[in-house]
Image: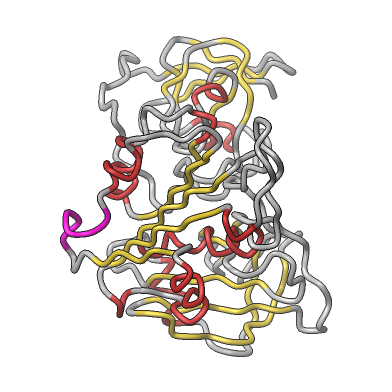
Amino acid sequence: MSTYPKNSLRLSLRQVTHQAELINSYEMVDSNGDDLPAYTAGSHIDFYFHDGIVRQYSLCGDPSDRKRYLIAILNDQKGRGGSTALHNRLHVQRYVHVSEPRNNFPVAKEAKHHLMIAGGIGVTPMLSMIYELQKTTVAPYHGAPSSDAKDNFTLHYCTKSKDHTAFQPELAKLIDQGKVVVHHDQGVPGNGLNIQELLQDYDDGTHLYYCGPPGFMKAVKQFSSHWPEDTVHFEYFNAPEPEDTTKIDSNNQGSQIKIASTGAVYTVPDGKTIVEVLQENNVAIETSCNVGLCKTCVIKYLEGEVKHMDCVLSKTEQEEYLTPCCSRSVGDLLILDL
């Protein structure tokens, strides 16, 4: 029997469009024609499968359009199975269950210029950003005059070839205007955009946004490391390989977590996550991606040292918060603000 979260939205799939090689877009609407919950540029929704699997997909339509949600999905044969299942199963007029939108990748309102770099299907959250930015007049920055919306963003869109480039009709005018620059590498990353050259100089007031496959994310992170932390924004679609592979010394007995409100102490053995132990002991905690990509399970910790394994929290946030779906305690006791 299929079970979905009580607060999930039951939507009708109105249209499926082939956008590029292995990429389809899916348009979902309320079956009664009612407005959908509002969202902001950069938001994503959880997509619930009948077997309990949950996947996250960025909304790539116009945030001001309350009548539909639009997502685009790459049929990734090397992924976790969700994208292939959706490509095979989703058909027009079928009902789907999704969450209300959440945003871990918002547009920085204070930015003078928005520099976006997308790798492949990583373009999806940036499409909604473009819709929003085209309607925005940039506020004066450090005494400079305000600028028109057409001057406030640039998107570098990196794909393998024209056949692998989604949303070409929607982007055509912006390509002609030079606001969107498409780079084809024919499958050889070194033949595409020179990311190092693009990011070597930081311009005051510019904010960077990037999203794409693992190798692309690693490169942009490396070449933007000299940019101020609060000007760099990113979203991972896949959990990256951990940079620190040092094994946690737990004497094979695991570590302990303490619930601040009750004083209860639980052992987290090797091979289990903090979330799993909490759920086994009936401590309610909401989860979604379970790999540190979405911030759904983020909780505050009061004492202890954490080995952070997520890719959504900033270094500042990690001083107070952790993602218990993947991060672990380094010491003997970790006190959670629950």
Number of callouts in the render? 0
Could you say where residue 27 lies in the image, as x and y percent from the top left?
61, 79
* Residue displayed at 48% across by 48% down: 115
**Colour scheme:** secondary structure
Q: Nearer the viewer, residue 187 or 303?
A: 187
Could you say where residue 289 lies in the image, as x and y percent from the top left?
51, 49
Q: Is residue 304 visible?
A: yes
Q: Quadrant of residue 219?
A: top left
Could you say where residue 191 lies in the image, as x and y percent from the top left?
17, 59
Q: Is residue 57 visible?
A: no
Q: Residue pushed farthest bottom?
A: 92
* Residue displayed at 29% across by 47% down: 195
* Residue displayed at 65% across by 81% down: 95
For this view, does 243 lie left or right of residue 48?
left
Q: Which residues are magenta?
A: 188-193
Q: Quadrant of residue 109?
A: top right
Q: Nearer the viewer, residue 140 or 91?
A: 140
Q: In this rendering, is residue 2 above or below 55? A: below
- Figure quadrant of the N terminus: bottom right
* Residue displayed at 50% across by 85% down: 17
- Figure quadrant of the C terminus: top right
Q: Nearer the viewer, residue 256 or 196?
A: 196
Q: In this rendering, is residue 208 above or below 159? A: above
Q: Quadrant of residue 181?
A: bottom left
Q: Nearer the viewer, residue 230 or 141?
A: 141
**Magenta stretch encompasses residue 77:** no
